[in-house]
Image (tube, grey):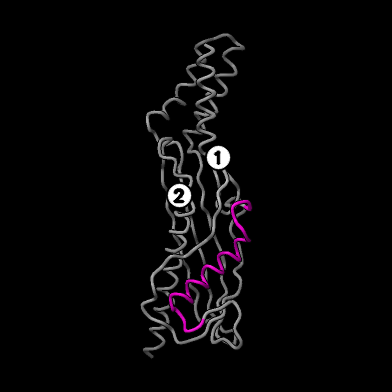
Amino acid sequence: MKSILKNSLFAALLIFTTSCSTISYVPKVSLDVSPKSINKSVQIDKFINSSPVTDKRNPFGGVSVTNAESLSNDLDIEVTNAIVSDFATNGLFKQVSRKIDHPDYVIKGEIIKFLGKSELNDFAKFSFGLAIASAIIAPVVRNPAIYLGTVPLYSCYLGLPISKNSADIELILKLYDRNNTLIGTYRGKAFENMSTSIYKNKMLAVPTLTNKNFSAAVMQIREQILDDFSKIDNH
């Protein structure tokens, strides 16, 4: 029985430690050159961060890329700079910067949601808790049958998914002219889930997954802006 107790505690500890850590994250947009360039200058103000506080919290046995320990700066600054870099580098507008004298347009953005997490799934959390409880209670009540509560925990060695990586991004950009008149509102949303087993720990892939969906959301916004300006040009 002692060996069962030790093995159960070891298995629970293994699942927890392989899923719990702190990772560094830098928001980055990775897109191709814009198919068209708008011959205007644009100033992009610092985004407002309205994302839920829960998005930033490290989950039990997991990580959040927007946790304060994962970011080198505040999320609103990081996201703003990443979008400025993409719009400027890939030629969406003639000139793009955080500060421009007499710009043709001003972009004001809002982060509605910015989630990137790796966490144990519900089955793993249940198995973990049940195994620990069984391993503690069984020696006290002296009923070996209680050790059966550790069985679900061992199923992780069969390659069943025990964790999931999630990315959920939603951004809003508003474009204003030099008279502060709203020209257009643009929204980008992207979401993706990935399940992993104990043999394929994908926790370190969360930053890549998050930036993939960040890029997808920005791509949607770029397409909407180009579509709007193509309509203006045709009139």
Q: Which residue is mark 1?
A: 20
Instruction: Name the foreground residue: 98 vs 109.
Output: 98
Categorize mark 1 by other alpha carbons within 10 Å: few (<14), some (14-19), many (20+): some
The amino acid type found where label 2 is placed reads: Ala
Residue 63 point in image, percent of width and height: 55, 45
Residue 189 point in image, percent of width and height: 45, 62
Q: Which residue is mark 2?
A: 205
- Left or right of residue 178: residue 94: left
- Left or right of residue 78: residue 92: left
Q: Quadrant of the C terminus?
A: bottom left
Instruction: Name the foreground residue: 55 vs 73.
Output: 73
Q: CA distance from mark 1 to mark 2?
A: 14 Å
Residue 17 point in image, percent of width and height: 54, 35
The quarter of the displayed image where residue 133 is located: top right
| Residue shown at the point (57%, 74%) measured from the top left | 108
The amino acid type found where label 1 is placed reads: Cys
Q: Quick check: 25 above or below 11?
A: below
Residue 84 point in image, percent of width and height: 53, 73
Give the residue furthest to the top.
142
Residue at disc 1, secondary structure:
loop
Q: Quick check: 84 above or below 193?
A: below
| Residue shown at the point (42%, 49%) measured from the top left | 193
- Magenta highlight range: 68-95
**Is residue 17 on the magenta stretch?**
no
| Residue shown at the point (41%, 46%) measured from the top left | 194
Give the residue furthest to the bottom.
235
Residue at disc 2, secondary structure:
helix
**Is residue 86 on the magenta stretch?**
yes
